[in-house]
Amino acid sequence: MRPVPHSHRRPVGPCRRQRRVGRRCTYRRRARRPVRTLSRGVDVYLDWYFTVVAEYLRLAAAALGDFGSLLARQLDRHLFTGTAFQARLAPLEAEAEGAADAEFRAAAGRLDHRLGRIAAIAEQREALGAALKARQAARIDAWLLQLQRDFLPLHHGL
């Protein structure tokens, strides 16, 4: 069997990659549904935007300093009115928020576990350092005693 050239391989999109992860792929597909309802309103908005009346409204709004709010009102009127976009998006937002909370709680648990391990290692290191210092002090004391025993008689003999 001949290897498939790189250019002929099927591209791996984010949704296909995430099938391994689980729910994320279905969440993305479900999130596209409310957005599709908005795409119908885009054509209506653009039809309004490129009319002569809309051009004069934009000029007047720019002169009055109300340009941004005019466009926001018209966008809301043409895109969101009658689409139930918020109602369709609300369950997805709640699900995403719940999934994010669960992910954060799991990450916090993992972090707490790792911090506990780090604290235990630090305590062990401190205990080993104290034991090593005590052992070194005991060796130094023993060495000094040995020096006293070996050289003290020499000193008295002078």
Image (cartoon, rainbow, N blue to C red):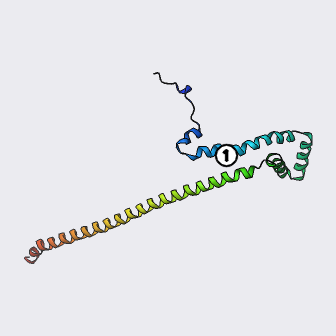
Rendered location of residue 86, percent (x, y) = 74, 52
Rendered location of residue 33, percent (x, y) = 70, 43
Rendered location of residue 16, percent (x, y) = 57, 38
> Is 129 on the left-hand or right-hand side of 86?
left
* Image quarter of residue 116: bottom left
Mark 1 lies on residue:
31
Count the labels in the image. Answer: 1
* Residue type for callout 1: Ala
Q: 20 or 75, which is in the foreground?
A: 20
Q: 77 or 151, which is in the foreground?
A: 77
Quick one: label 1, few (<14), some, or many (20+) residues within 10 Å? some
Q: Say if 69 sits above or below 36 in the image.
A: below
* Image quarter of residue 54: top right
> Is 31 on the left-hand or right-hand side of 14?
right
Q: Residue furthest toward the bottom?
A: 156
Q: Which residue is painted at 54% across and 59% down in the image?
A: 105
Q: Which residue is painted at 78% across and 40% down in the image?
A: 40
Q: Residue furthest toward the left?
A: 157
Q: Quadrant of the C terminus?
A: bottom left
Q: Quadrant of the N terminus?
A: top left
> Is 108 on the left-hand or right-hand side of 137?
right
Q: Say if 66 sits above or below 50 in the image.
A: below
Q: Secondary structure at mark 1?
A: helix
Rendered location of residue 104, percent (x, y) = 55, 57
Q: Say if 73 sits above or below 131 in the image.
A: above
Q: Which residue is painted at 59% across and 40% down in the image?
A: 15
